[in-house]
Image (tube, rainbow, N blue to C red):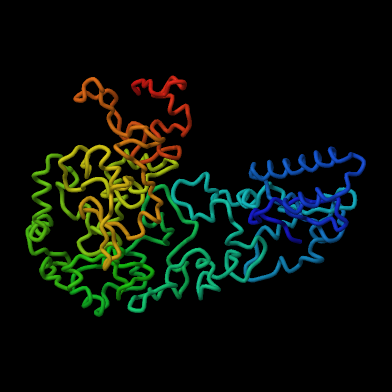
Amino acid sequence: MKISTPAAKAVILVHHDQPENRVISLHQYVNRAQNQNPGRHGNHGSFTAMILRIVLAVTCAGAGLPLAFSAIHPVPLDPKTDDAKCLECHEDKTKGTAVHSAIATGCLSCHQVRVNKDTTRVMLITATPYKLCFSCHADKDATQIKGHVHPPAVRDCLTCHDPHTSANKNQLLRATSGEKKDNLCLTCHTQGTNVPDKGSRHAALDLGCDSCHTTHKTGADLTTENQFHLTKAAPALCTDCHDPKDAALQKSHHNQPFGTANCLSCHDPHQSAAPKLMAKFVHPPFADRKCELCHAASKDGKVVLTQSDVKALCITCHSNQAKLIETAKVQHPGAAGDCTDCHSPHASKSPGLPKTDPVNICLGCHTDQAEQGKKAVHHQPAFGQGCAVCHEPHGSERAKLLRAQGNALCLECHGADSVPQKLEAQHLLTIFEGKVRLPEDYFEKNKAFVLPLRYNLGHPVARHPVSDVLDPKNVNKVKTPLSCLRCHQPHAGAQPKLLVKDQQNNMAFCDNCHQNRMDMTQIVEAK
């Protein structure tokens, strides 16, 4: 007995007009219906009936109903068929290493039999498989969970689990260890499968992904443990295998205390292009193994620095940043504290060595922007590449720590005259006079829209201005203030194009300023 699931991509219909009474796809249904004899209804009646069936199928699919109404059972069944009858053919569903506990309650706890004349259909008792799963596993319902949920677990239980029995625990379709062809996790994930020749790979991968991860683990707090579904947080997770008292480990860490440090601040947990699973970006003294530049011998199991405090230590090399922080016209309060409040002193997975990543390192303080992140559409630099693409993190001459004033900020990426500089040896691009570095495929990958502007005209339609419109009677007077922010939000929005007040991209939006559609040159000041 096979039940069609939402994994199918075509709407499935039971076509009663075919002799074999098969389940066919929507496009097949249309083609066959068009080729049939009109019968007693005539051409119009047959076509109308076909259209009604198609509309019904598409409507149900759009409403989230199963893409398969039912599966035709190969032999007729009595409407009151019991579980024993099912097991005459499907006894294999009750045997295996891991058998679904629901099997013990009987086939009809999940399936139902429907008979119409000489056609027997078998279907689930709910509209979709995941709804059926949640009737027992309500704690796995993503709509009721606060926090990051493993994407397949949102509504695709059968992506990972067999509903009846499996050779793997928890009825997984495949094991969580082994080569790519055998490992269920590697169906979607690639960690550990493409290690460079001179790189390193964590041996724990061979033990299975579940040695460190619990797929359904989550929580409202945005901790690393919850975000990546870890069995426990680092370093406790790491020290289960790596004993901090091991002499070889102590030597490799220059006898500095590391037992309570976050291992993930220096090491990638899966693979690295460098030896020892080292993070991609490394602080030069750390990379050169010159630990003595910053560290004295530890005392009583605690780290001892070569300077009186963290900031005094950092400015021995980074005095330019210290000067910028102190003298900037617009100062960043967050930069006034210890450098290690934001930066990792050893290594990081991102340029600039942020302790987390280039977005979340800022959102920890800027909670108002974190709220913006809940909106559906994100500006890529704000919630992807990092806040420092547009903002200077240590201090600026401009309000809001912006790297450029007004439209110049936006046109650095979206202007036709802006040409990023290439650092070919490093596979990077730079903007803002080399101050911001981006991956070499950044603009291609993110499909940054380049505005076809000439003399500040041309967006969103030809001859539409994008900057202040001057009074023709007095060129020193602004008639209509205008900038990118007149129409767009800089961080996120509820609608595409990030339009202000989360409005849709239509003429109603234009009416905010152009209230006379018969004469679009008449402008009303936006409120």
Task: Work out whether 212 lies above or below 522.
Answer: below
Choose between 331 and 441: the one closer to the eye.
441
Quadrant location of residue 391? top left
Name which residue lies at 54% across and 50% down. 139
The x, y position of residue 448, in whole percent, is 38, 49
Q: Nearer the viewer, residue 378 or 523?
A: 523
Relative to residue 305, is residue 522 depicted above or below? above
| Relative side of 178 to 112, left or right | left
Q: Quadrant of residue 211?
A: bottom left
The percent position of residue 255, horizontal first and vertical second, equals: 18, 74
Q: Quadrant of the N terminus?
A: bottom right
Answer whether residue 361 is visible to the viewer in this image: yes
* Along the viewing direction, whichever of 154 and 50 lies nearer the viewer: 50
> Would you identify the image quadrant in which residue 238 lies?
bottom left
Whole-percent x, y for residue 453 in the image: 34, 40
Q: Is residue 113 visible?
A: no
Q: Residue at x 29, y 66 (%)?
A: 280
Q: Which of 138 and 2 is in front in this view?
A: 2
Residue 209: x, y in percent?
Answer: 46, 68
103 left or right, relative to 475: right
Residue displayed at 50% across by 63% down: 188
Q: In this figure, what is the number of numbered marks?
A: 0
Give above or below for 502 relative to 137: above
Residue 460 in the figure: left or right of residue 394: right
Q: Which residue lies furthest to the right in this view?
A: 40
Task: Answer with left or right where residue 498 lies relative to residue 158.
Answer: left
Q: Residue at x 12, y 64 (%)?
A: 304
Q: Quadrant of the C terminus?
A: top left
User: 396 above or below 169?
Assistant: above
